[in-house]
Image (tube, grey):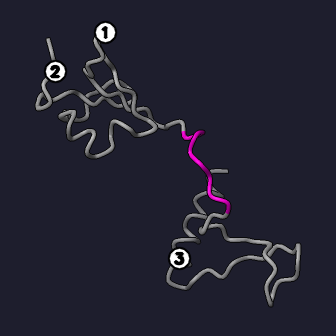
Amino acid sequence: MNIRVSERIPVRNGEGVIVERVTLESARGRSLAAAPNAELVRKRKGEVVSINLRSSGDESDTPRLRAHPFKYSHNHENETNPENVWTLRHIPTDTADIFGAVVNQLAKAA
């Protein structure tokens, strides 16, 4: 039995529960099939029969950026920061509440 492009295949969460049914075409269009936490289940002939989603994915082959724009400290030399000295970045007032909430949540979890 060949799977037609318009036929819907199940998408299962980590516990094996079907959370959605999608066409293979829409799964490719939404990049669901290429997600790092997605596992395509195939028949012997290579036909995709379902997609299993894990709670996390392997992104070890993803290239890392040299500097992350959301880090709140740096050791870059500038007019207010001498060489090899770490300093905190300025947190804008419009995001300070969000930053504080995240820090508090992480502190409670630790």
- Per the model, the C-alpha gap separating discs 3 and 1 is 53 Å
- Per the model, the C-alpha gap separating discs 2 and 3 is 50 Å
Numbered tag placed on residue 3 in the rendering: 2
Instruction: Tell me the quadrant of the picture where the N terminus can be found.
Output: top left
Amino acid type of the residue that numbered disc 3 sits on in the rendered structure = Asp
Mark 3 Cα shell of 10 Å, populated few (<14), some (14-19), many (≥20): few
Q: Residue at x 35, y 27 (%)?
A: 52
x, y (%) of residue 43? 29, 13
- As drawn, is 100 to the left or to the right of 41? right
x, y (%) of residue 78? 79, 85
Give the magenta range.
59-66
Q: Looking at the picture, does residue 33 appear above or below residue 88?
A: above
Amino acid type of the residue that numbered disc 2 sits on in the rendered structure = Ile
Secondary structure mainly formed by the magenta segment: loop
The mark that comes first in sequence, 1 or 2, is 2
- As drawn, is 66 to the left or to the right of 77? left
Q: Disc 1 vs disc 2: Cβ atoms closer than 8 Å?
A: no
Q: Looking at the picture, does residue 51 appear above or below residue 34?
A: above
Residue that numbered label 3 is attached to:
97
Mark 2 Cα shell of 10 Å, populated few (<14), some (14-19), many (≥20): few
Q: Nearer the viewer, residue 31 or 57?
A: 31
Q: Which of the two marks, 2 or 3, is nearer to us in this view? A: 2
Among all residues in the image, which is located at the extreme bottom? 79
Q: Residue at x 33, y 23 (%)?
A: 16
Q: Residue 45's quadrant in the figure?
A: top left
Residue that numbered label 1 is attached to:
44
The mark that comes first in sequence, 3 or 1, is 1
Q: Residue at x 60, y 39 (%)?
A: 60
